[in-house]
Amino acid sequence: MAVQYDPNIIRGYAEALYRRASRIVFMAGFIGFVVGAVGGAVVTSAMKYNSTVTLGFVLVGTLIGVNIGRGRAFVLQLQAQSALCQVAIEANTRRAADAAAATPRTAEVAPLAQVG
């Protein structure tokens, strides 16, 4: 089976990376929220603090989760942009090669000089 180049596959891959990047920020924030809530509940029950400490843990956990999610989303978006850039490079190179192949070539003959 011969494998052929299909730029639509790479574009689909880039779109999937962008969708994943948009979801990862929300998911990381949600996980940070849950971890903060559990951590705050444990500290509140063990140390006999009031519920504002739990809210502080939830806020900090959510912010940390969102920041981690943004970093991971940036990496995914960068991968998507690299893939799209490679597709653009291939298209531009193919266009230039097709244009060069379509132009008729004239035989350029350098003037010969007889010495001696």
Image: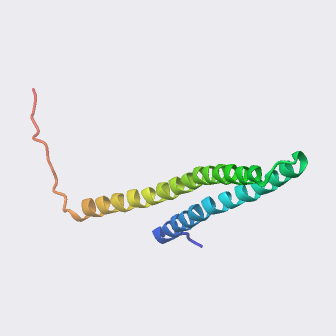
Q: Residue 111 vs residue 50: left or right?
A: left
State the image coordinates of residue 55 (x, y, percent, origin top left).
72, 54
Residue sitting at x 56%, y 51%: 75
Residue 115: x %, y % from top left: 10, 29
Q: Residue at coordinates 9% horizontally, 41% vertically from top-left? A: 111
- Residue 5 appears in the rendering: no
Q: Which of 50 and 6 is in front in this view?
A: 50
Q: Could you tell me which quadrant the N terminus lies in?
A: bottom right
| Residue at (73% x, 50% y) in the render | 57
65 vs 45, left or right, is left
Based on the displayed image, in which of its 4 quarters is residue 35 positioned? bottom right
Give above or below for 64 relative to 9.
above
Q: Can you say which quadrant of the picture contains the C terminus?
A: top left
Count all numbered tags in the image, as a single digit: 0
The residue under the point 46% across, 68% down is 7
Is residue 91 positioned above or below 49 on the image?
Answer: below
Q: Nearer the viewer, residue 92 or 47?
A: 47
| 15 is higher (above) or lower (below) than 38 | below
